[in-house]
Image (cartoon, rainbow, N blue to C red):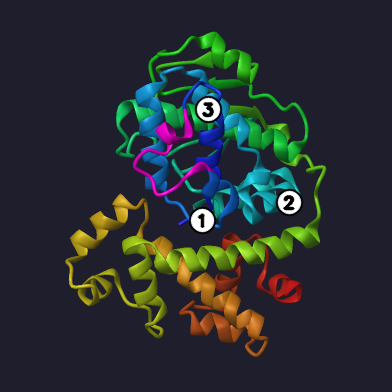
């Protein structure tokens, strides 16, 4: 469950296209007033329902672009502010991917470094089971969000070199080219936002390492809480967390959940998860807990978490958190 900031952005944007709040929020347990005044939780399913309501009444391709443009990082709470004050643009982008589950995710996000290009991509865009019109709406919204977020982090008019879209040209290309201020290509194998590589070496104007460390710790706890309660992956997380080292195999977890390993793998895939990812998250959650306790050496923690040696643990911890175990312990 998530704060309904995306739902509110859709509401405000769609009202500008002539829709009423009742039409936008049809079949949802919210009113415009409750979104504005109450502390509420919403889900991805709630957002998809609202999108279906909007698309049924308004097919203007500018609407999803407007929604994406309006979703500045300040709307994302702790996750957004952590991105704004990262120690470098590269670090902020890595943080965005690592903690993306906190951002009411509609698509998976990732990036590649290709020669002199930095490329944002959406690995599951062909796998998510969205109805075609909803898929197109969300994809255009995601593109506009990404461009907006890059500009928020850099505080500069950073433009993509090119935008590649994996759908047919159902909208006027000039509409997207005007928004992104770069060439836009349709009917491509994958959707990609291509930037010059130099962007990753910039320092965000709002950079603040101390604030970023504090916010990252808060986001890590939020992610742990989210994993513990959501779907099949949450149940797997709890089983692994409650099992002492050696950690259980996927077959053993499946048996505890009274399903076959094949069924468990399929259900995890439906949630865009893998067992190895969840195992890493459990290890990371426990590692952070042991480091905060300040009673275990790094060698002790490596042994407790089933690593072959402390060096392997240090490498994994830095990959998970962007800092070494000793740096993490000093920061807390």
The x, y position of residue 66, in whole percent, is: 57, 26
Quick one: SS at disc 1?
Answer: loop
- What residue sits 41% from the left and 23% below the top? 166
Which-is-in-front pick, marks 1 and 2?
1
Depth order, front residue of 108/7: 7
Depth order, front residue of 236/24: 24
Among numbered discs 1 and 2, the one appearing first in the sequence: 1
Compute the Cα span from label 1 to label 2: 28 Å
Find out whether the residues at labels 3 and 2 contact each other: C-beta distance under 8 Å.
no
The x, y position of residue 70, in whole percent, is: 62, 33
- The residue at which mark 2 appears reads as 86
Query: Magenta stretch: residue 47 in it?
Result: no
Quick one: SS at disc 2?
Answer: loop
Quick one: SS at disc 3?
Answer: helix
Give the image quarter of residue 327.
bottom right
- The residue at which mark 1 appears reads as 40
Among numbered discs 3 and 2, the one appearing first in the sequence: 3
Q: Is the residue 103 above or below the residue 256 in the image?
A: above
Helix, strand or loop for the magenta stretch, by majority: loop
How many dots with numbers? Answer: 3
Quarter of the picture holding the C terminus: bottom right
The x, y position of residue 243, in whole percent, is: 37, 83
Compute the Cα span from label 3 to label 1: 21 Å
The x, y position of residue 67, in whole percent, is: 55, 31
Q: Which residues are magenta?
A: 20-32
């Amino acid at each position: 469950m998530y704060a309904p900031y995306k739902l509110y952005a859709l509401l405000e944007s769609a009202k500008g296209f002539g829709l009423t709040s009742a039409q936008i929020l049809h079949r949802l347990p919210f009113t415009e007033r409750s979104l504005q005044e109450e502390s509420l939780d919403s889900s991805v399913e709630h957002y998809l329902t609202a999108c279906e309501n909007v698309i049924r009444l308004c097919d203007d391709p500018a609407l999803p672009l407007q929604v994406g443009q309006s979703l500045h990082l300040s709307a994302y709470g702790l996750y957004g502010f952590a991105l704004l004050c990262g120690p470098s643009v590269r670090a902020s982008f890595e943080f965005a991917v690592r903690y993306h589950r906190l951002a009411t995710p509609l698509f998976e996000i990732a990036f590649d470094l290709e020669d002199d290009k930095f490329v944002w991509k959406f690995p599951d865009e062909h796998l998510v089971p969205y109805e075609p019109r909803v898929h197109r709406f969300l994809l255009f919204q995601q593109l506009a969000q990404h461009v907006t977020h890059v500009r928020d982090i850099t505080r500069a008019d950073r433009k993509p070199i090119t935008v590649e879209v994996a759908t047919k040209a159902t909208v006027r290309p000039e509409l997207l080219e005007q928004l992104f201020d770069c060439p836009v290509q349709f009917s491509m194998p994958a959707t990609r936002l291509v930037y010059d590589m130099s962007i990753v070496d910039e320092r965000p104007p709002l950079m603040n390492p101390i604030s970023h460390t504090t916010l990252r710790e808060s986001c890590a706890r939020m992610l742990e809480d989210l994993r513990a309660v959501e779907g099949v992956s949450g149940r797997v997380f709890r089983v692994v967390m409650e099992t002492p080292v050696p950690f259980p195999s996927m077959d053993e977890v499946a048996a505890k959940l009274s399903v076959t390993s094949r069924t468990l793998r399929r259900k995890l895939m439906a949630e865009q998860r893998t067992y190895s990812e969840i195992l890493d998250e459990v290890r990371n959650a426990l590692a952070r807990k042991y480091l905060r306790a300040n009673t275990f050496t790094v060698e002790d923690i490596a042994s407790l978490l089933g690593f072959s040696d402390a060096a392997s643990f240090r490498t994994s911890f830095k990959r998970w958190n962007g800092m070494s175990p000793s740096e993490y312990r000093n920061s807390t």
